[in-house]
């Protein structure tokens, strides 16, 4: 019997600047002691291998923050150590998120040499005014050059765009989408701009600094995105992610299928099976607090808990209903210990099926396109 599959997430918390829409665990520092951080990440990786031993690593994902600011030597050391600590899949997917500034794109050759075989670029917009509004440090020309560089060095690459920006119409988004398709490889991530508490945009928006497109226009942009990418052979496999057949991000699928992963670095989360339950881990989020803890104890774990029973079912539902293909009922039962349809109250399910937000058949429970567009509200109805 082959070892259970595992994903490994590595969080690099540093950015050159904080984007006004970003609520991720990212921080700006004048300088970073790269050798010290490399040693700490390696120590916590070794701790994670003790937490989830005897697995086969299928994917690694370097996220952030801005992991393209890591020294390629650090990336190479973490990949090599992961291969020593666990069995690894022959076709392991190793993704790194990158910003398309010329400085970071200049590291692509070294990152590919380190073992990265998939890069995800945070382009976010294709015109100067929108990039300025979003607080991005790269120009549109730099984004195009970074995409060309990524194509040269990585067999697999993707980029992100943010739509439903202030003043953007469905017609303007349609034009930008056509340009994006002309630049795309096998994968695109297309996110609707949301205003998150704790961000600069939250304050600016509350003060009336800008106005987002209304609900009708935003819904139209979502729907045209789904339809246009479907016609282009890159259908949505998740709410915001589109790929050609076989080109989905395998690491993110681990999350959405509620499979096992470990997380290292400040604020990183992990979920992995321990008996019939899931062990949940969370590392300290503050970079300096995490670093000090790892150097003192070998890991920066702030919290460890067990996810079981109803909580396990609800977590698995929240992740699985994001997928266009929905939840495989048999796989869900093997992970969560219950069939998802049986675990939910029929009085909650049936009205949502009748309204066209959910579909149930013998093998799957899935949210329809309308359901995925309103997933938060749908989940509130299902599990509140």
Image (cartoon, grey):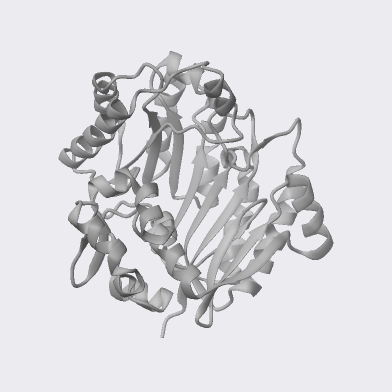
The answer to whether any part of residue 117 appears in the image is yes
Q: Is residue 135 visible?
A: no
- Residue at horizontal 28 percent and vertical 63 percent from the top: 349
Taking the view exactly as shown, the residue that stands out farthest to the right is: 296
Q: In this rendering, would 77 be left or right of 241?
A: right
* Farthest-out residue, front: 347
* Quadrant containing the C terminus in the rendered view: bottom left
Judge left or right: residue 294 versus residue 342: right
Closest to the observer, 157 or 25: 25
Q: Is 281 positioned to the left or the right of 343 in the image?
A: right
Q: Position of residue 105 (x, y in %)?
A: 51, 32
Image point (38%, 42%), residue name: 157
Tell me the residue at 58%/43% (across/down).
Answer: 64
In this figure, what is the number of numbered marks? Answer: 0
The one of 107 and 27 positioned closer to us in this rendering: 27
Give coordinates of residue 289: x percent, y percent: 78, 50
Is residue 199 depicted above or below 83 in this figure?
above
Percent x, y for residue 352? Answer: 25, 56
Residue 305 position (above or below residue 128): below
Above or below — where is 369 with respect to 351?
A: above
- Residue 44 position (above or below residue 145): below
Question: Looking at the rendering, in which quadrant would you find the N terminus?
Answer: bottom left
Image quarter of residue 307: bottom right
Name the residue at the left extreme.
231
* Residue shown at 73% from the left, 62% from the top: 299
């Amino acid at each position: 019997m082959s070892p259970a599959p595992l994903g490994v997430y590595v969080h690099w918390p540093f950015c050159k600047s904080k984007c006004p829409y970003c609520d991720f665990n990212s921080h700006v520092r004048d300088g970073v002691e790269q050798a010290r951080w490399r040693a700490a990440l390696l120590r916590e990786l070794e701790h994670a291998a003790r937490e989830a031993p005897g697995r086969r690593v299928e994917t690694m994902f370097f996220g952030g923050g801005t992991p393209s600011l890591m020294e390629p030597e650090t990336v190479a050391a973490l990949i090599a150590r992961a291969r020593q600590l666990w069995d690894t899949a022959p076709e392991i997917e190793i993704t790194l998120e990158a910003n398309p500034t010329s400085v970071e794109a200049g590291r692509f050759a070294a990152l590919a040499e380190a073992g990265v075989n998939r890069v995800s670029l945070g382009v976010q917009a294709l015109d100067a005014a929108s990039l300025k509004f979003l607080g991005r440090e790269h120009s549109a020309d730099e984004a195009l050059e970074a995409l060309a560089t990524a194509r040269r060095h990585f067999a697999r690459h993707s980029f992100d765009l943010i739509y439903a920006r202030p003043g953007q119409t469905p017609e303007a988004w349609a034009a930008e989408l056509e340009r994006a398709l002309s630049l795309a490889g096998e994968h695109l991530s297309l996110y609707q701009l949301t205003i998150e508490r704790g961000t600069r945009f939250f304050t600016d928006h509350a003060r009336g600094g800008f106005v987002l497109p209304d609900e009708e226009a935003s819904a139209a942009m979502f729907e045209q995105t789904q339809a246009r990418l479907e016609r282009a052979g890159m259908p949505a496999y998740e709410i915001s992610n589109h790929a050609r057949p076989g080109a989905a991000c395998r690491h993110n699928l681990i999350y959405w299928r509620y499979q096992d992963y470990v997380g290292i670095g400040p604020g990183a989360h992990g979920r992995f099976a321990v008996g019939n339950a899931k062990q949940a881990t969370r590392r300290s989020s503050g970079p300096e607090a995490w670093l000090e803890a790892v150097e003192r104890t070998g890991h920066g774990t702030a919290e460890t808990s067990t996810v079981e029973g109803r909580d396990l079912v609800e977590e698995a539902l929240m992740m699985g209903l994001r997928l266009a293909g929905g939840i495989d009922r048999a796989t869900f039962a093997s992970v969560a210990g219950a069939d998802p349809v049986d675990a939910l109250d029929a009085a909650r399910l049936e009205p949502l099926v009748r309204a066209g937000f959910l579909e149930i058949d013998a093998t799957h429970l899935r949210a329809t396109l309308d359901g995925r567009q309103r997933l938060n509200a749908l989940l509130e109805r299902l599990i509140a």
